[in-house]
Amino acid sequence: MKKILFFFFLILSVSSNAQRFNGGIVLGMNVSQIDGDAWGGYNKAGVVAGAYVFTKLSNNWGAQLEIRYSAKGSAQSLNNMDGRKIRLQYIELPFVATYDFAKKLEASAGASFGYLFSAAQNDGYGYEEFEQFDKFGVEVCIGLKYSIFDNLSVSARFAYSVVPIYALYSGASGGNAMYNNVVTFAFYYRIGNRY
């Protein structure tokens, strides 16, 4: 994992001088739920933070790779007085294709690959480690990004698990499995020139 992080930040540092690449930092918030836990509702908030590299492929098309910390999970309710919740912490690598369909508006779609490094469940008496969740996750995602300033954008992205994050038995689906269901709101700050 350290080698991946080193390689990514090396690319990010070089990207500001490259003709067709740029990069920057990402900071935002997830609102999430876990489909299959019987609670329902986007009641769990979590931090998203990381970095990205972007390249322009044509006038309208581009590609973006990110590496980020992403906190997900679920909670029984918004006020959640009894403390019941599931906390999942991932290192993610989202890869998306982008399309500029207006001067300041960009659509994106792609996939995100995640490594779950911490999972815990709170039953109202404090968090306890919960090892049953799958360590590796794959999600599909779609989003919109709006440029506020030349180097600052805000985005909304929806992501959903392709494979279960937890299965009652091998090959389980539907009511016998759980899936991440996440909406992310984030700011993207570009470092250096556009291209």
Image: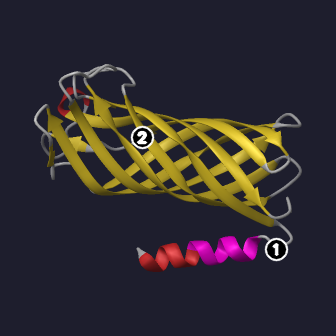
- Tell me if I can see residue 115 in this picture: yes
Q: Secondary structure at mark 1?
A: loop
Front in this rendered view, residue 106 or 51:
51
Q: Position of residue 70 (x, y in %)?
A: 44, 49
Q: Residue at x 66, y 38 (%)?
A: 155
Front in this rendered view, residue 22 or 43:
43
Please give the range of residues in magenta: 8-15
Residue indicated by mark 2: 46
Q: Residue at x 58, y 48 (%)?
A: 27
| The disc label shown at residue 67, or none | none
Could you tell me if the residues under marks 1 and 2 are in contact, i.e. CB atoms within 8 Å? no
| The disc label shown at residue 18, or none | 1
Going from N to C along the chain, the mark reached first, 1 or 2, is 1
Q: Position of residue 158 (x, y in %)?
A: 53, 34
Q: Residue at x 52, y 53 (%)?
A: 49
Q: Residue at x 83, y 43 (%)?
A: 149
In the image, is 95 to the left or to the right of 191?
left
Number of other residues with Cα within 10 Å of mark 2, as a class: few under 14, some 14 to 19, many 20 or more: some
Seen in the picture, residue 25 relative to 162 is either above or below; the reply is below
Name the residue type under label 2: Gly
Magenta span dominant secondary structure: helix
Seen in the picture, residue 140 relative to 79 is either above or below; the reply is below
